Structure formats: structure tokens, C-alpha cells
Image (tube, rainbow, N blue to C red):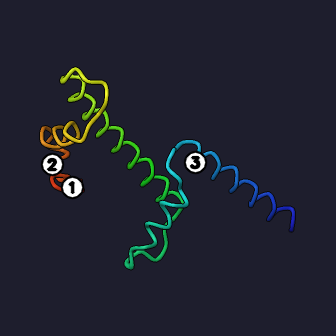
Amino acid sequence: MMSEEKENHDERNVEEEKAEKLVKLPLSRIKSIIKMDPDVNLASQEAVFLIAKATELFIESLARESYTHTAQSKKKTVQRKDIDAAISSSDSLLFLEGAIDV
């Protein structure tokens, strides 16, 4: 019985390691952020993984769009104005308008 429990535990660890390699953001930190919401009682590993992956894809999309504006300015460094231009020019990013104010 004990060896079966150990095998299940080892399988879960292997699955978690594979999931962590598929995302670059720290899953433990994402889970702690999710738990900050008082409406959330439990977050499954699959939900945490999907949120992490979706966040990475969103950041990648914003970075690509920002770099497009940087390249149009014939610059090599992405600046705040490039991010603002990307947000203003893309309908899917308009919800960020004014959210990145420092």
C-alpha cells in the first residue's frame, strides 16, 4: 500500500515538473495571487497552469505589438511611449488604457 502511495506521489511530482517547464512564470506565485481573491476557495493545478500560460501569451502579444512601434521609430529599445502606442492602436489592448500610469 505504501509503495502505491509513493508511486502516485512521484507521478504527481513528475507532472508538476513538466507543467513548470511549459511556463516561465512561477506557478507558486500565481497560485498565491489567485488565493488573494476572497471569492476563490480552491485553485486546481490545471487552472493555475492555464492562467500562467495565458498571462505569458498576453505579455508576449503586448511585447510584440510594442516592439512593432519601436521598430517603426527606427529605435532598438522599447520605451513607455511605444507601449502606450501599442495599447492605443490595438482594439484588444484598449482595456489597458490608463492602467500603466506610474
Quadrant in the picture for residue 85: top left
Element type at mark 2:
helix
Element type at mark 3:
helix
Q: Which three-letter amino acid code belongs to the residue tagged 3?
A: Ala
Image quadrant occupied by the C terminus:
bottom left
Near-viewer residue (30 or 45): 30
Q: Which three-letter amino acid code belongs to the residue tagged 1?
A: Asp
Quadrant in the picture for residue 86: top left
Work out whether 35 lies above or below 7: below
Picture disc at residue 12: none
Residue drawn at (36%, 38%) of the image: 60
Near-viewer residue (74 or 47): 74
Picture disc at residue 19: 3
Residue 79: x %, y % from top left: 26, 37
Q: Which residue is mark 1?
A: 101
Q: Which residue is mark 2?
A: 94
Residue 68: x %, y % from top left: 24, 27
Residue drawn at (15%, 52%) of the image: 97
Closer to the eye: label 1 or 3: 1
Closer to the eye: label 3 or 2: 2
Q: Would you call the spot at circle 3 few (<14 residues within 10 Å), some (14-19), or many (20 or more)?
A: some
Residue 14: x %, y % from top left: 70, 49
Q: Which three-letter amino acid code belongs to the residue tagged 2?
A: Leu
